[in-house]
Amino acid sequence: MLIFLWFVILIIALIVLVKSTDWFVESSEKIAFALKVSPFIIGITMVAIGTSLPELLTSLVATLKGNTEVPVANAIGSNIANIFLIIGLSAIAAKRLVVRRNLIDLDLPLLASSSVIFLFIILDRKINWFEGLILIFCFLIYLSYTLFERKEEKLELEGKIVEVLPSRIERRRREEEMIFPTLLYFFLGIIGLIFGARYTVESLIQLSLLLKITTSFLVITIVAIGTSLPELAVSVLAAAKKKYEISIGNVIGSNVFNALIVTGFPSLFRNLIVDDLTFKIGFPFFILATLLMIISGISRRIHIWEGMMFVLIYLIFIIKLFNLF
C-alpha cells in the first residue's frame, strides 16, 4: 500500500513539474516580449532551457539531498529517450523526417562535441566542481554560437512576428489585460516547479528504499520518460505536420542542455557519481543513440524504418535495465 502511495505521489509530482514548466516558460516569454527582448533570443533560450527544466530541477534537488547519482542518470536517461523514443516516433508519424542543412552544419556538430566532452568527463565515474564549470562554460559557448550563427533565421522569425503584430493601441490594450494573468502563471510556475521537483525526488528516494532498488533505475526509466512526454507530444505533432526542424531541433537542444547543464550545475554543490547501472547500461546506449542520431542526420533523411529501429532499441534498453536478458 505504501509503495502504491509513493508511486501515485511520483506521478502527480511529475505532472505538476511538467505543467509548471509550461506555465513558467510561456509567462517568461510574454514578460520578455514586454521588456522588448529580441524574439529570436527568446526562442533560442526558451527552447534550450525550457524543455529540460524538469530534469535540471530534479537533479539539483536530488544532489542537495545527497543523491548524487541522480543528475548523470537523469541526463543519460533523458537523452536516450529523446533520440530513440521521440525521434523514433516522430519518424514513424511523419513517414520520413527531413533534416535541414543548418541542422547538419550547426546543430549536429555541437551535439557531437558536447557529447564527447560529457563522455570524457564521466569516464572516471565522477564529476567535480571544476569539471562542472567546464560543462557550463561549454554550454555558454554553444548558446553564443547558436545565437550568432543563425542570422538568416533571426530575420525570418522576427519578420513573421512583425507581420502578425496587431496595431500599437490594440497591442497595448492586450498587454494591460494580460499583465495580471501572466504574472500569476509566472509565480504559479515557480511554486509548482519547486514542489514538483521536491516531491519527485522524495518519492524516488522512498520508492528505491521500499523496492530495494537504486534511485538511478527509477530516474533513468520513469523520470526520463515522464519529463520527455511534453517534448514527445510536440515533436510527433510537428513531424506529422511536416515541421521537421521543430521535431529534430527540439531534441538536439534538449540533449545538449542535459549533457552540459543538468550535470554541470548540480556538480557545483556536490561531487556527482556515476553508479553501476548508469555506467554499464546507460553509458553504452547513450553513445549508440548519439552516433545513430548523427549518422541519420548527415544522411538528411530519417525514414520510417529507422524510426521503428529507434523505438525497438529503446525497448531493448528498457528490457536490459530490468535485467531480463
Image (spheres, rainbow, N blue to C red):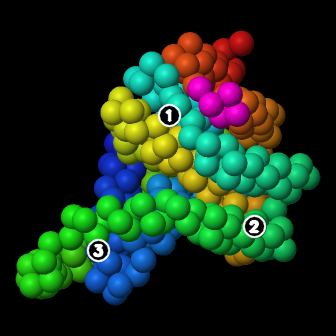
For the residue pair 150 and 97, the one nearer the viewer reads as 150
Q: How far apart are marks 1 and 2 (CA)?
A: 25 Å
Q: Mark 2 points at which residue?
A: 138
| Left or right side of 280 for 306 | left
Q: Name the residue under label 3.
A: 30
Magenta stretch: residue 72 in it?
no
| Left or right side of 195 for 283 | right
| Left or right side of 159 for 322 | right
Q: Residue 107 carries which label?
A: none
**Mark 2, residues whose alpha carbon is within 10 Å: few (<14), some, or many (≥20)?**
many
* Residue 82 drawn above or below residue 102: above
Q: Is residue 309 visible to us here?
A: yes
* Residue 160 drawn above or below residue 233: below
Residue type at numbered disc 1: Ile
Along the polypeptide, which appears first: circle 1 or circle 2?
A: 1
Numbered range of the magenta stretch: 297-301
Q: Distance between the residues labelled 3 and 1?
A: 28 Å
Q: Position of residue 102 (x, y in %)?
A: 61, 48
Total labels drawn = 3
Residue at position x 70%, y 60% in the image: 260
Q: Where is residue 221 in the image (x, y as percent from the top left)?
A: 56, 36
* Residue 77 drawn above or below residue 318: below
Of tags 3 and 1, the one toward the viewer is 3
Along the polypeptide, which appears first: circle 2 or circle 3?
A: 3
Give residue 182's quadrant in the image. Answer: bottom left
Residue type at numbered disc 3: Lys
Residue at position x 36%, y 79% in the image: 32
